[in-house]
Image (cartoon, rainbow, N blue to C red):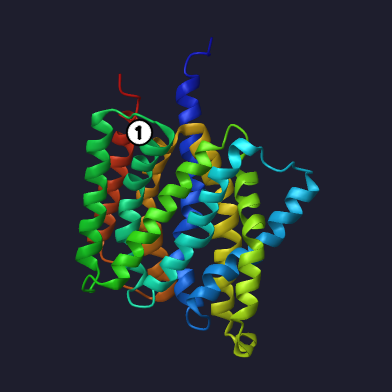
């Protein structure tokens, strides 16, 4: 028998861990924009995974972690393809034609897409009220993004949609293998298993001028390697495993505003008071979605 309030504390822990991951993920688009000043999109997408594979391999060796069991390998491969390859590659291509703040469109849709993936892949069944609040949150964020972005929808938006779909499917599969592989192990194995591909391609597309890349571009690449694709997943995967994919995914609605704040600070993009008003509204929606996320009967 569970102690009174244990479920609530478990959900709170899951949401808290997920939020730490979201803050780290929030810097991905601005830092990718910085990296694009000197590096090719494919080099950024695969290079960050190749760099992150080094600490990932060291941790797995240090803690003597066994290879994931057969039951988890299929989902691990899908998760790696979506989060290590798909999301960074599509995002980098999108950012060649649209500003970082415009990425709020895909970030606004990502929590809802992740919840849908959780239903299809993991069999989660949130209540109808959860879907209503989730949809409202997505509409709010999209409305904010469309209002603020001075960009005509085009290929950049299509790439962001593909990036969001890749991430949502990957997140759901990480949660699927949580009973056998912990959060930090799953992303570490994903990076190590894809390293033959990422290292080989990076070596093939390497350019000598990368050695003279400006410091901001180098720091942008290193951030995406160490935080976006590595440490952020330690917290994000653990949060989803503890609090449930559909519930914790709603915290990612706040990632949009973390991204916009960092885009303003790092890239000098202007942010008005209306954007912060949207942030308050979205925070309320996240709270309501959390309260209504119990399983349907």
Q: In the rendered image, which quarter contains the C terminus?
A: top left
Judge left or right: residue 286 versus residue 208. left
The image quarter containing residue 156 is bottom left
Where residue 52 appears, x then y in whole percent?
64, 61
Q: Is residue 148 above or below residue 38?
A: above
Can the viewer see residue 27 in this picture?
A: no
For the point 47% across and 78% down, which residue is it?
A: 36
Q: Nearer the viewer, residue 272 or 222?
A: 222
Q: Is residue 222 above or below residue 80?
A: below
Find numbered disc 1 in the image and state the secondary structure of the residue it sits on: helix
For the point 60% across and 73% down, which residue is it?
A: 201
Where residue 171 appears, x then y in whole percent?
47, 46
Q: Is residue 230 above or below residue 7?
A: below
Q: Which residue is mark 1?
A: 290
For the point 40% across and 43% down, which residue is it?
A: 249
Can the viewer see residue 6 in this picture?
A: yes
Where residue 164 appears, x then y in whole percent?
38, 56
For the point 56% across and 44% down, which residue is it?
A: 74
């Amino acid at each position: 028998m569970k102690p009174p309030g244990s479920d609530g504390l478990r959900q709170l822990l899951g949401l808290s861990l997920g939020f730490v991951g979201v803050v780290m993920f929030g810097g991905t688009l601005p830092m990718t924009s910085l990296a694009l000043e000197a590096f090719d999109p494919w080099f950024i997408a695969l290079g960050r995974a190749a760099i992150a594979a080094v600490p990932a391999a060291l941790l797995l060796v240090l803690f003597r972690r066994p290879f994931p069991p057969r039951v988890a390998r299929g989902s691990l491969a899908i998760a790696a393809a979506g989060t290590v390859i798909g999301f960074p590659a599509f995002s980098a291509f999108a950012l060649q034609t649209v500003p970082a703040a415009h990425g709020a469109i895909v970030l606004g849709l990502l929590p809802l897409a992740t919840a849908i993936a959780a239903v299809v892949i993991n069999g989660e069944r949130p209540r109808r009220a959860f879907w209503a609040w989730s949809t409202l949150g997505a509409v709010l964020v999209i409305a904010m993004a469309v209002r603020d972005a001075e960009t005509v929808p085009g290929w950049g938006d299509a790439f962001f949609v593909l990036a969001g779909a890749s991430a949502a499917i990957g997140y759901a599969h990480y949660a699927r293998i949580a009973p056998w592989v912990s959060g930090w192990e799953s992303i570490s194995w994903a990076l190590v298993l894809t390293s033959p591909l990422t290292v080989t391609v990076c070596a093939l597309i390497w350019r000598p001028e990368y050695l003279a890349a400006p410091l901001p571009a180098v720091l942008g690449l290193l951030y995406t390697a160490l935080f976006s694709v590595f440490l952020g997943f330690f917290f994000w995967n653990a949060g989803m495993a503890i609090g449930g994919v559909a519930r914790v995914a709603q915290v990612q609605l706040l990632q949009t505003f973390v991204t916009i704040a960092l885009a303003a600070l790092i890239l000098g993009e202007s942010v008005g008071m209306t954007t912060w008003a949207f942030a308050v509204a979205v925070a309320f929606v996240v709270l309501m979605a959390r309260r209504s996320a119990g399983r349907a009967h």
